[in-house]
Amino acid sequence: MIHIKLSNIKIPVAEARNIKNLVCKQFRIRTEDLNGFRIVRQSVDARKKNNVLYNYQVEVTLPDNYHSLLNGPDATESITTQELTYPKWHHDRQPVVVGFGPAGIFAALYLARCHAHPIILERGERIEERLLSVQRFLQTKVLNPNSNVQFGEGGAGTFSDGKLNTNVHSEYNQFVLNEFYAHGAPEEVTYQQNPHVGTDYLSKVVKNIRSEIESLGGEFHFNTIFDGFEKDGDLLKVYCSNNKTFITNYLLLGLGHSARDTIRILHARGILMEPKGFSIGVRMEHLQRDINRMQYGSAANLLPPASYKGVVHLKDRGVYTFCMCPGGTVMASASEEGTIVTNGMSEHKRDKANANSALLVSVTPEDFLHGSVLDGIDYQEKYEQLAFRMAGDGRAPGNLVGEFLKKQVAQRHRKVVPSYPHGLYYGDFDRCLPDFAVHALREALPLLDRKLPGIANVDTVLTGVETRSSSPVRILRNEDRVSSVPGIYPIGEGAGYAGGIMSAAIDGLKTAIHIANP
């Protein structure tokens, strides 16, 4: 038997259910000779709205007499992906992983498979209790400051669209996708061009990964806040707010981008870090059916909910869409009292009426740096607090694109019903965003509409503020992934080395591999 990868398979979207037969027909394979069939990659080609196609890459297993297929331009012999190895942990002390978001999850999973019995410290609740805390906040506005949309088992990505696409070209991409599938995500995440899990599936995946780590001797401590460290020769004493102390040689910090109190503790203890650019802006919300028609034309009813991506380069700023959530909701994502923070979330079916996406303006250290590396955190907090003060009762600042572009304020929504759970207070974004951001958004929206017709429709809802696109600091580390304090390894988004579930997971995984393979 031979394994062959077949590419450039274009199939009308209405015929996708017959993919096996169509592949056999295109490559002259007898169906009875097909001993194995696996979709490797699936994407949508919507450049011609009157002829929208799926583009597939598949792997087939065939008898040896099909070797001549390899002479064609669209066939190559499949190479077996090299599996990760898990060397036995070579230290007496257990490694400590702070934070069980994507970076911490994949670091802890790898270390557990090396029989390192990792200790995982998570300031929030396990996913079952965390879901209840988030639901209570959405219904009553009562916030649990340590277990919410930002904090708790699974990290901030648990309450997002669960996107698993990344701009990082890593040898570990497929490993991470396969692990999501193995722990409960739908199989299509392993081959779709822009895979996503959805909040409903992510919570199950996270729970299943935790169960595997526990079965391998991993030790979880929920509701446990990392409160500092002390160097003791080659060892680190790790202190927690509930009077727990752990001693280790390896401390992995997967803090997430919202652990501001922890970043301040690390800075006070002399951990070297630098200011880092981030972005600020609003969430814009459309009817999903309008986005489907914009992207797919007459094929809109045959395809899953459509997404979009756009960027505008102004004279001195970039304005871009971010974390687009088809068929989702705009989330109340605060992790501190008296603040408004927005984000987007979708479940796996993406079946809600609205689509939403952040529309963000780049912020550079020159905009906020006044002398402290922590100034970016203060900058984010300032605008989150200003957004809260506009209504003072948990409603988020809102406007419609039509009025916003005219420097006016809408009285209420029209075509699109806002999904923000605590409601909107229609007001002027000048009161809760930097002047340059408001000007950039006004300049960029009409330009973006030329690329994505309908994006700047007058009825489009804008909800503020979006401030947590990435961490405003980067904890410095060397080529061995070690911080300025030996034994401490910053990982993931909160450390400034990732920007999403996939890149954070890969960063945590690479650090775990590095320390387990001396």
Image (spheres, rainbow, N blue to C red):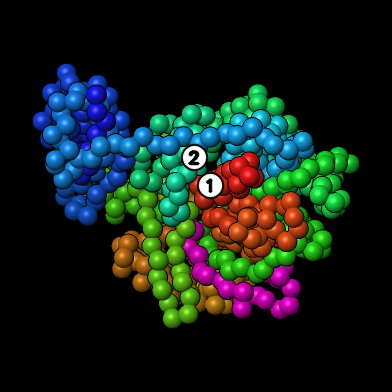
Which range of residues does the magenta coloring cover? 358-382
Q: Is residue 82 left or right of residue 70?
A: right
Split into 4 quadrants, where in the image is the N terminus?
top left
Q: Where residue 65 sits in the image (x, y, percent)?
A: 14, 26
Residue drawn where x is 19% and y is 23% of the image: 63
Q: Is residue 58 above or below residue 254?
A: above
Task: Give left or right: position of 516 versus 407.
Answer: right
Q: Nearer the viewer, residue 219 or 15?
A: 219
Amino acid beneath label 2: Val
Q: Please provide percent x and percent y for residue 381.
A: 69, 64
* Residue kind at label 1, given as amino acid type: Ile
Left or right, 439 with reference to 277: left
Gap between marks 1 and 2, in whole Å? 7 Å
User: Are the residues at dot 1 and dot 2 in contact (C-beta closer than 8 Å)?
Assistant: yes
Instruction: Looking at the picture, tell me which residue is in the foreground, 201 or 338.
Output: 201
326 vs 259, nearest the viewer? 259
Q: Element at badge 2? A: helix
Q: Pointer 2: what residue?
A: 176
Residue with the most extreme right position: 243
10 Å crowding of disc 1: few (<14), some (14-19), many (20+) = many
Give the left or right position of residue 319, taking residue 79 as reference: right
| Helix, strand or loop for disc 1 | helix
Quarter location, residue 108: top right
Which residue is at 60% across, 46% downward?
514
User: What residue is shown at x 74% (from left), y 55% (from top)?
Assistant: 486
Above or below — where is 406 with respect to 75?
below
Residue 314 seen by the camera: yes
In the picture of the structure, the residue carrying the numbered disc 1 is: 506
Dot 2 alpha-carbon crowd within 10 angstroms: few under 14, some 14 to 19, many 20 or more: many
